[in-house]
Image (cartoon, rainbow, N blue to C red):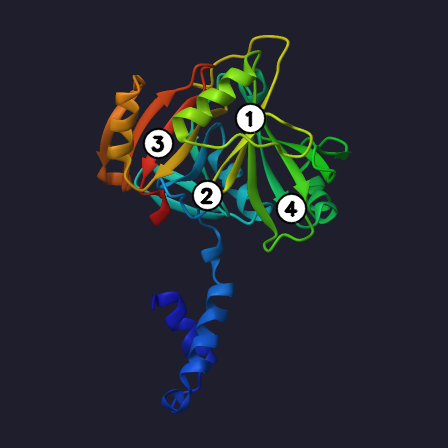
């Protein structure tokens, strides 16, 4: 049992009667501890290939402001490992680098990413206090109430209401926009072994554990993501080195080859998709 749950046990169980509790009672209390701890902010269970969705990585001008917003409005938990700062959220992490971005997310192929929220009116009411941009509500592709909010540095985020959500907010989708979106979807499906299946009215989507990947067209070419406010996306692997060997056998070129970075507790590699989206492959984020 970790220190968090030991402390909770100390509060819940009076001294001198611990040995009198039945195993059933102890188990019930332990499950209660799990429910009230921040353990919900974790990645989804990997698929049979050992893959799950990992993170988005943002370049930000004010990292303290971003940390505040991700914690206060999205329920995130900040984790710092060496030089790396990440915010843990259900189904994903948001990594933050203090760097002036070259452009906002909507100028690139990686247009935006999105969350499900249990009560969208409650979220919107609180968001209005930030003074940051928020669009009008609309009915999304799945028939639910949606709204876009603009994070600092022109990071566009879509919120979708789901009143049956087990948590307040959870990572839900990333949305690509490019003239060749169908070909890009096929590439992701092949490289990551994902099944193409619709999300509401959007036919061109696929699902990795914890995250939907949606692909839409664009009348104008979009720019690569490197250096922008939404610099790259990421997938987490159980065995990254073996996966990199599989990619090499498929002829995939690496922007950054497989390596270990002990200072941040990660194994990493980078590739770039055919449309210019940077993809970080990691092993170790599931331990954050």
- The residue that appears at 59% across and 20% down in the rendered structure is 106
In this rendering, the label closer to the viewer, 2 or 3: 3
Q: CA distance from mark 2 to mark 3?
A: 18 Å
Q: Nearer the viewer, mark 3 or mark 1?
A: 3
Total numbered labels: 4
Alpha carbon separation for disc pair 2 and 1: 17 Å
Residue 5 drawn at (x, y percent): 40, 69
**Residue tagged 2:** 87
Task: From the image, tell me which residue sits under label 4.
Answer: 117
Mark before the other along the chain sequence, 2 or 1: 2
User: Badge 3 is on which residue?
Assistant: 281
- Judged from the image, the secondary structure of the residue bearing numbered disc 2 is strand
Q: Rounded to the nearest whole Å, what is the CA distance between mark 4 and mark 2? A: 17 Å
Element marked by disc 1: loop
For label 1, the crowd category at 10 Å Cα-Cα, with few meaning under 14, some 14 to 19 and many 20 or more, is: many
Q: Position of residue 119 (x, y in %)?
A: 70, 49
Residue 116, percent from left and from top: 62, 43
Most extreme residue toward the top is 220
To which residue does mark 1 refer?
Answer: 153
């Amino acid at each position: 049992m970790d220190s968090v749950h030991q402390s909770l046990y100390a509060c819940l169980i009076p001294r001198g009667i611990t040995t009198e509790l039945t195993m059933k009672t102890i188990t019930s209390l332990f499950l209660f501890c799990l429910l009230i701890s921040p353990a919900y902010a974790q990645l989804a269970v990997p698929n049979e290939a050992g893959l799950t969705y990992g993170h988005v990585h943002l370049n930000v001008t004010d990292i303290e402001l971003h940390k505040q917003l991700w914690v206060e409005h999205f329920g995130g938990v900040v984790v710092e490992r060496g030089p790396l700062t990440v915010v843990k959220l259900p189904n994903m992490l948001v990594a933050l680098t203090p760097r002036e971005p070259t452009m906002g997310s909507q100028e690139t192929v990686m247009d935006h990413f999105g969350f499900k929220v249990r009560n969208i009116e409650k979220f919107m009411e609180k968001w209005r206090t930030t003074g940051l941009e928020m669009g009008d509500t609309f009915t999304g592709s799945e028939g639910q109430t949606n709204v876009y909010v603009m994070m600092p540095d022109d990071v566009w985020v879509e919120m979708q209401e789901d009143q049956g959500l087990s948590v307040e907010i959870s990572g839900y989708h990333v949305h690509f926009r490019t003239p060749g979106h169908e070909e890009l979807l096929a590439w992701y499906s092949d490289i990551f072994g994902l099944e193409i299946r619709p999300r509401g009215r959007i036919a061109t989507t696929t699902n990795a554990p914890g995250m939907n990947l949606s692909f839409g067209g664009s009348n104008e070419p979009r720019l690569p993501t490197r250096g922008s406010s939404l610099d790259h996306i990421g997938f987490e692997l159980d065995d990254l080195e073996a996966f990199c060997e599989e990619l090499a056998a498929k002829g995939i070129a690496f922007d950054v080859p497989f390596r270990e970075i002990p200072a941040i507790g990660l194994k990493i590699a980078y590739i770039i998709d055919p449309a210019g989206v940077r993809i970080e492959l990691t092993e170790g984020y599931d331990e954050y």
